[in-house]
Amino acid sequence: MANYYEYRHRVGFEETNFVGNVYYVNYLRWQGHCRERFLEEKAAQVLTDIMFNDLKLFTLKAECDFFAEITAFDELSVRMRLEELTQTQIEFSFDYVRLKDGLENLVARGRQRIACMRGPNNETVPERVPAVLREALAPYHGERFGRRSPAGRAATATGGE
């Protein structure tokens, strides 16, 4: 079994810029898609808690380092791993791997830190990471793709979600 959760994506034209490569904000969007699919498949009870019991998952920080360009119709594997789990926060890492002709090429690497909160808006307080989510994340802690990070340019976005 792989030590990462995988979200597969085929790049569309709408995700590219006028030059033809993928616009950087899409990498951050794919982190969100990967995280949401993980919750849906592995910890659906957390989604119920979000919808009906005031649980909130706030994105504290999201970032991505780019190593190679990708374009429309590239097949991408976004591989999410658990990097850190505290009482109230989770940090994920994401490897963006292009899949082509049976080969894998690391094209970007990202991170995302979230905080678990509960309560109505403007009165939210930190909340322990739900036990069901802790259990669902347990198999996904481990080594990343490759051993060294190639030098690349970085884009960072921060803010709440």
Image (cartoon, rainbow, N blue to C red):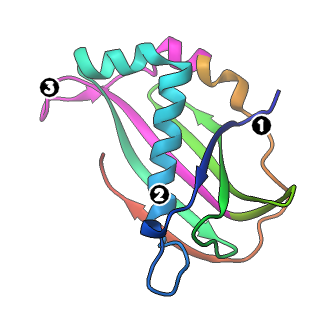
Query: Is 99 displayed left or right of 117 in the figure?
Result: right
Q: Secondary structure at mark 3?
A: loop
Residue 160 in the image, given as x and y percentages of width and height: 30, 49
- Please give the range of residues in magenta: 108-135
Q: Which quadrant of the figure has residue 123?
A: top left
* Residue type at numbered disc 3: Pro
Q: Which mark is residue 120?
A: 3
Q: Nearer the viewer, mark 2 or mark 1?
A: 2
Q: Which mark is residue 142?
A: 1
| Residue at position x 69%, y 75% in the image | 68
* Residue type at numbered disc 1: Gly
Q: Which mark is residue 28?
A: 2
* Residue type at numbered disc 2: Leu
Residue 42 in the image: above or below residue 69: above
Counting residues from the N terminus, which is met first, the one under dot 2 or under dot 1?
2
Tell whether position 159 is magenta: no
Counting residues from the N terminus, which is met first, the one under dot 2 or under dot 3?
2
Estimate how packed mark 2 is, as few (under 14), some (14 to 19) or many (20 or more) residues with alpha carbons within 10 Å. Answer: some
| Residue at position x 66%, y 55% in the image | 76
Query: Is 80 displayed left or right of 38 in the figure?
Result: right
| Residue at position x 52%, y 60% in the image | 27
Residue 85 in the image, given as x and y percentages of width and height: 57, 31
Q: Nearer the viewer, mark 2 or mark 3?
A: 2
Residue 139 in the image, given as x and y percentages of width and height: 72, 24
